[in-house]
Image (cartoon, helix red, strand yellow):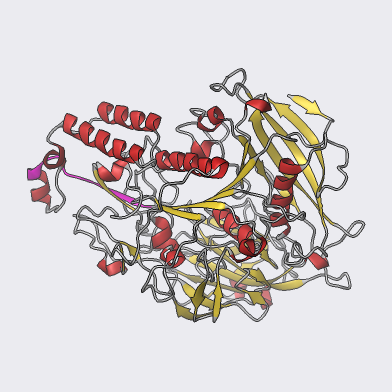
Amino acid sequence: MQQSAFFGSPLAEARITGLTNCTTTSPYGSTSFGTVGAYQQLACTANGAVDPNDPLNAIIQDINLASTVSGLVQYSMDITILMPTDLSKSNHVMLFDVPNRGNRLLPGGFNIGGSTTAAGDGFLHNQGFIMVASGWQGDALPGSGRLTMTVPVAHSSGGGTIIGRVRTEYGLTAGPATTQNLGSGPYTGTTTASYETITLNNSGAVLTQRVHQDDPRQLIPNSQWAFADCTGTPFPGVPSTTQLCLNGGFDTNHIYELIYTAKNPTVLGLGFAALRDLASFLRNDTSAGNPLAGAIQRAIMYGVSQTGRTVRTFLDLGFNEDEDHKIVFDGMNPHIATARIPLNVRFGAPGRAAGTQHQEKQFPGSDSPLSWGDSFDPLTGENHGILDRCLASNTCPKIFQTVSGTEYWQSAMSNDTTDFRALRDLPIPPNIRIFYLSSTQHGGASVTASPETDTMSYCQYLLNINPYIYNTRALLTDLTAWVIDGTPPPTSRYPSVADGTLARADRIGFPKIPGVNFTALYNSRQFLYRGQKFDFVDMSGILTEPPIEVADYNVLLPRVDSDGLDVAGVRSVAVSAPIGTNIPWNYRAAGFGEGDLCDLSGSFFAFATTKAQRIASGDPRLSLQERYGNHQGYVDAVAEAAEDLVADRLLLSADADSIIVAAQASNVLQ
């Protein structure tokens, strides 16, 4: 490890004022990647300052209530830069990874095998990408290698403490617990800071429980819970302004909701400005303080799930225009994300989901607009789209939106591409391509996944084993070529009203598979009134809790074939040459809100091996023998499906070879 003092000096006229505490490491040792050579990693603290009076920053919630130094609001964040040791051998493209709840996803997010800190097969490295990641979520806590950001607390105009009502929700899957952090959630655990209660007296707070999302909330008497820590001391525990203790403990079968009065909101919206300013600095600054000076010609922003929503909101709020009015990112890939993120709200909780059918459903995120281009929403009376600001400033990037089936069943993906009544398809702007990764679950599956090993204790069925990693690798390659030299990308592939591949949940054509109780349950999308101080168009402002339910939107789902596999989209080899039915949804097991959707998990149901077996079980789906005859027939079908995808630029040749080799080595019809 090499310590660098080189980057510590202030950078004049830069919004990033300095890089400090820098260390350089060689994470892959002497490994050389193709013609690019060795890689090194630089880790620093980036310090920045924002002018609250700049019109591009004025949209940041409470920016005018943050303390300043020389008129500027200051912040700092962790950053990492993974780059070729010889930058002249890079492809001169900055691939900017927005960490999910502080956890960096690249390069592992695009690798076959390997962890998020390993090179895997070197897919990104061999192409010479400069991979950058930084903290952006001001409430993410340090630890376990998370990249964090420090932002100021907002104070009233007179310098006093700001208070407000905060709503939190808890749903346990790992087992019962005596205590919850106030900021804990199903997707954050204990990795997010909690807003302190203004008092240990809980008389003004409300705690409820229910089994299912739509069940009536049952009030838990205030005498049965406390702002306290009971992990080592029985109820009422040790008083705490950031923890919640329930007499008898929290179980896995209930959703718990707490509404309380908190203090000291932080200016979380600075995270958008920090992402903008760091990327602009690394791309454009020519001073000696920029370790990438002159190396970057193009930039692509990449986010997954939570951070895919961050990418969409970053663009929506105008942050792809830097303070010199230049474009920041030429390309974007918001992956498995349909909504936006409530980062720019007072007492924001960006680590929470945009809402699944079972939990966190009514938190901000899925509020209109969802569409890229303008669409009229008669419930809100507004006509807007995600691209409005970048169109006005001529800073719109080229965008690949990639989604799994979970985004349709849990996140109203059809509302991204259809009108309010779900009667017609919306026009998709020319700088957008949408790719539905057919019959996949939210996080995809490992290329080594198998129904024997891929299970989850609180889901009823085996997990989906259809990986989308092969297709996303090809699509990143296509996006990069589009960004670098304008090579036309593949056409969009997603279900639509016009071709009949979108339908109501009870009309998608799902077959009667033995042992599967298909209930057509999906996550409805609601229009929620969140108070006069909340701006749903900009996903900004101050929330009134709890929200008021006004109406439901119409949501459509992908139509399936006789096997239960999605008809439209990018049909992977596992869909075109299947060994079973991969499904984007699953149901919760007994003791975990039984019957509700199992959050972000899909399912897998294997085909029978022989015709006799399927007839005996009453399975309408053809058996493996009926489909392929023998093992070689299966391998031939896999090869044909792979070749078709390669021809359509939806699969790389090298990955096609790997898939065929895996089919040859499989025990299918062996």
Q: Camera-side residue: 320 or 312? A: 320
Residue 124 falls left or right of residue 491: right
Q: Camera-side residue: 171 or 227? A: 171
Q: Position of residue 68 (x, y in %)?
A: 88, 59
Indicate yes or no whether the magenta region holds residue 607.
Answer: yes
Residue 453 falls left or right of residue 159: left
Quarter residue 167 falls in: bottom right
In this view, which residue lies farthest toward the right?
A: 70
Quarter residue 26 falls in: top right
Magenta-tinted stretch: 602-612
Give the residue displayed 29% in from the left and 63% down from the top. 499
Residue 495 sits above or below residue 551 on the image: above
Residue 420 falls left or right of residue 398: left
Q: Position of residue 20 (x, y in %)?
A: 81, 38
Give the residue displayed 67% in from the left and 24% down from the top. 86
Residue 75 falls left or right of residue 566: right
Q: Camera-side residue: 348 or 483? A: 483
Total numbered circles: 0
Residue 345 sits above or below residue 662 on the image: below
Q: Camera-side residue: 195 or 579? A: 579
Q: Position of residue 110 (x, y in %)?
A: 49, 38
Give the residue displayed 63% in from the left and 47% down from the top. 102
